[in-house]
Amino acid sequence: MNNFPHYKELISSGLLPADHYAFGMPVDAPIIPALNYFLFLKNVTNFESKMNAFLTQPIMKKETNEGGRQWHSICGELRAIYLLGKILGLPIIGYDQNSPRSSRRSNNCDIVVEIDGEQVFVELKSKCSEVSQALPIILQKALDNLDPRYTLTAQLLKRDYDCNNLDSLIKKIKDHIADFHKWKKEGFHLSEDLPYPYGDEEIYINFFDKRQISPGSEYYEPDSIEDICNFLFESKKSTKTGELMVPMVQKAQKKGADYLICRIHGCDLFNEIVNECFDEVKLSRGLTYVSGDSRLGSLRGVILFAIQDKFCIINNSNAVIKNWIEV
């Protein structure tokens, strides 16, 4: 697969629309090896439906970050497929298939691999808060051009923000800046050189001197190790909906998965994550750990990865079947 012939074939086919996130992507982009490998596996069961999702979902939309979230999700799948098949050497035999242990027939697992002639079902999840906080294109441009004195770095709080109130939002921010300068003239906040942060239920904005920080900067609140542990194991109420969120380990078990594979964006402190999040854990060999954590339940294990070549495996020592994935 030298020089990524399957990716080049996709580009020459004209199937990618111009507003697709992969359109015009250079051949040295980090995702290309995983995408090329996925395209090579065209005989895998349900490849067509997975390919259709790749072609139709990650479409750029100026008003929302939905396309970016979809692209990130698909990149996570591509990297998981590459990790399991290319790096770990497991035959990929299916996508989006129902496990015989699933609690519902509609609960398909994302990837099916083969280990010693046995079908092993893998469920993919992503913990990537930075992606959901990314700004829609027209909002970013509006903030970049709002005031020549300041760079505005923003964190999106409302995940599905669609810019339908953009004009009123920009007016509120301008009024916020004007109030700051009015107070300065009246003798208040004399020691402050920059406006205080602006915040509402949709966005949080910090102000910086444009001579020090260039426009286009964004503020993200990255996932902490505690966030990752909660994502995997803890039932907590959503700060947005108030609903109880089901831990990913439990979701994977309900789907009848053998393994949960979880993408962690921007963090590869795997030893710290494993020792902080999992009980009764010890390093087995290489990048493989063994854990006696009872919360793993019927799972054979969990695979954590940042990108396709940065990962670790935590196998469940209490699993009934110990036909494990190992490095």
Image (cartoon, grey):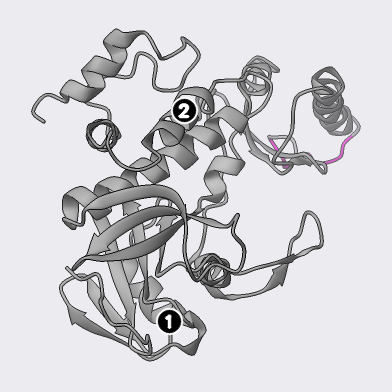
**Residue at x 49%, y 31% (from the top left corner):** 53
Name the residue tied to disc 1.
278
When asked about the image quadrant of residue 320, the answer is: bottom left
When the figure is inspected, residue 179 is found, relative to residue 256, above or below; the finding is: above
Looking at this view, is 61 or 116 the one in front?
116
The answer to which of marks 1 and 2 sits earlier in the sequence is 2
The residue shown at (23%, 82%) is 283
| Residue 188 locus on image (x, y percent) | 86, 40
Say few, some or many: other residues with alpha carbon within 10 Å of mark 1 (under 14 / 14 to 19 / 20 or more): many
Q: Horizontally, is 89 left or right of 10 in the view?
A: left
Residue 189 among magenta residues: yes
Is residue 80 at least partly visible in the picture?
A: no
Please give the range of residues in magenta: 187-193
Residue 268 in the image: x percent, y percent?
33, 59
Residue 319 placed where, x, y %? 37, 85
Q: Determine which of the numbered discs, if any, sits on residue 52 in the image.
A: 2
Dot 1 falls on a residue whose secondary structure is loop
Q: How many labels does the image show?
A: 2
204 inside magenta stretch: no
**Type of amino acid under label 2:** Asn
User: Magenta stretch mostly in which secondary structure?
Assistant: loop
As drawn, the residue found furthest toward the left would be: 2
> What's the residue type where badge 1 is placed?
Phe
Element on which disc 2 rests: helix
Q: Closest to the observer: 249 or 99?
A: 99
Instruction: Name the one closer to the observer, 237 or 276.
Output: 237
